[in-house]
Amino acid sequence: MYNIILHRNAVKFFKKADSITKNRISEAFDIISINPRYHPHIKKLKGELKHMYRFRLGSLRILYEIEEDIQTIRVKAIETRGSAYKGVQE
């Protein structure tokens, strides 16, 4: 099982979300922490973000990278589909 660390932008989105969305995001974190690479809603990104993965959660996207050596997942962004891939820090 992987540990999950949230970037400050992800924490900001999570805190502002309503309770239903928070529950959905928490369930997604549970899935990601067990198996961060293989799930119908997980896809490895391409191009400049090729080191990252995304989890599709309805109209939301959770963008994260995996640090295999320390069994950690760093969630870089939780955003709506249209703005999720803009300005993600490497």
Image: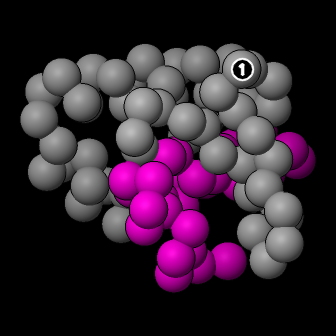
Could you say which quadrant of the image residue 38 lies in? top right
User: Left of 8 or right of it: where is 51?
Assistant: right
Which amino acid is tagged 1? Pro
Residue 50 locus on image (x, y percent): 84, 64
Quadrant for the N terminus, please.
Answer: top right
Of 81 and 37, nearer the camera is 81
Determine the residue positioned at 26% across, 55% down.
Answer: 13
Secondary structure at numbered mark 1: loop
Residue 63 locus on image (x, y percent): 58, 53
Q: Give the range drawn in magenta.
A: 61-90
What residue sits right under mark 1 in the picture?
A: 40
Residue 29 locus on image (x, y percent): 50, 28
Could you say which quadrant of the image residue 37 lies in? top right
Could you say which quadrant of the image residue 26 lies in? top left
Of 67 and 86, nearer the camera is 86
Determine the residue positioned at 49% across, 46% down.
Answer: 61
Quadrant for the C terminus, please.
Answer: bottom right
Residue 27 locus on image (x, y percent): 43, 18
Please indicate, yes or no, whether residue 64 appears anywhere in the rendered image.
Answer: yes
